[in-house]
Image (cartoon, rainbow, N blue to C red):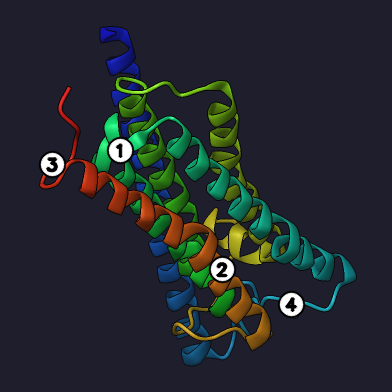
């Protein structure tokens, strides 16, 4: 048990450190872009001899279009189905009388963490700061997921089906962020220090996904993710009013 706690502690420290590294890399890349933009304005030439800083190409390639469709119509629905299955597993193992509101609160926290990259992907242009925030949020989500499971196994039976569902819930965000990084490869290169991109204010997508898809996606997330876990929290509260955890 002591070895498990030590591993969990180092895992949490490691994932949070990676989140910090990602955010730090985003700040550095933004500063480099800002600095080069000033050089261009002052001299009319970039340090590499060009007349402007590097711009990201428009999303016209067929492969990029397919990757976006896979994200929209496969990755997001798979994530929703996995979250709903996880809620069913909690209900089946009587969460309101085992781990209670504390575990449900961690689930809601992870939903809030996931909402950051999801909303950014739906509405915002993906530049270096936004991409670094997405990557950092993934690592924070990983740390919270480990916290959740390490608590759950002490009070209820986390069965193989639920463990398998957890593997989907952990890897789908990584898959999504990886695909978004491929779609915006120049931004990832800038984040890694291999390219300089011009900084830009936070802005909406220049190639929007469309209001019908955005509204449908948000509605599906509310119905299949937010509402089930709110119902779970209500069950927890009714079973143990005023308590985060049930009486042993």
Give the numbered dot on residue 196: 2
Q: Is residue 51 visible?
A: no
Q: Earlier in the sequence, mark 3 or mark 2?
A: 2
Front tag of 4 and 1: 1
Mark 1–mark 2 distance (CA, rounded to whole Å): 51 Å
Give the numbered dot on residue 96: 1
Q: Is residue 3 visible?
A: yes
Look at 25% across and 43% down and name the residue there. 101
Element assignment for label 2: loop
Instruction: Give the image location of residue 226, x and y in percent.
Output: 43, 61
On the image, numbered disc 3 is attached to which residue?
243
Front tag of 4 and 3: 3
The extreme left residue here reads: 242
Element assignment for label 3: loop
Look at 75% across and 80% down and name the residue there. 58
Q: Earlier in the sequence, mark 1 or mark 2?
A: 1
Vertical position of residue 186 compared to residue 207: above or below: above
Instruction: Give the image location of residue 145, x and y in percent.
Output: 41, 38
């Amino acid at each position: 048990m002591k070895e498990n706690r030590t591993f969990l502690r180092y895992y949490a420290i490691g994932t949070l450190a990676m989140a910090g590294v990602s955010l730090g890399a985003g700040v550095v890349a933004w500063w480099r872009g800002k600095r080069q933009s000033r050089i261009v304005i002052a001299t009319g030439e970039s340090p590499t001899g060009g007349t402007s800083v590097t711009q990201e190409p428009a999303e016209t390639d067929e492969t990029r279009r397919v990757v976006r469709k896979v994200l929209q119509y496969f990755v997001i629905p798979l994530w929703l189905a996995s979250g709903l299955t996880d809620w069913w597993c909690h209900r089946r193992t009587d969460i309101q009388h085992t781990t209670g509101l504390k575990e449900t609160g961690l689930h809601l926290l992870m939903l809030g963490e996931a909402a950051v990259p999801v909303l950014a992907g739906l509405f915002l242009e993906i530049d270096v700061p936004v991409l670094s925030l997405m990557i950092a949020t993934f690592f924070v989500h990983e740390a919270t997921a480990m916290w959740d499971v390490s608590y759950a196994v002490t009070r209820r039976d986390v069965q193989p089906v639920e463990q398998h569902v957890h593997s989907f819930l952990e890897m789908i965000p990584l898959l999504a962020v990886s695909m978004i990084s491929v779609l915006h490869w120049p931004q990832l290169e800038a984040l890694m220090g291999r390219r300089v991109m011009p900084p830009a204010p936070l802005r909406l997508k220049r190639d929007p996904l469309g209001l019908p898809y955005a509204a449908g996606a948000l509605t599906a997330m509310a119905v299949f993710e937010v509402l089930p876990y709110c119902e779970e929290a209500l069950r927890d509260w009714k079973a143990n009013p005023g308590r985060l955890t049930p009486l042993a």
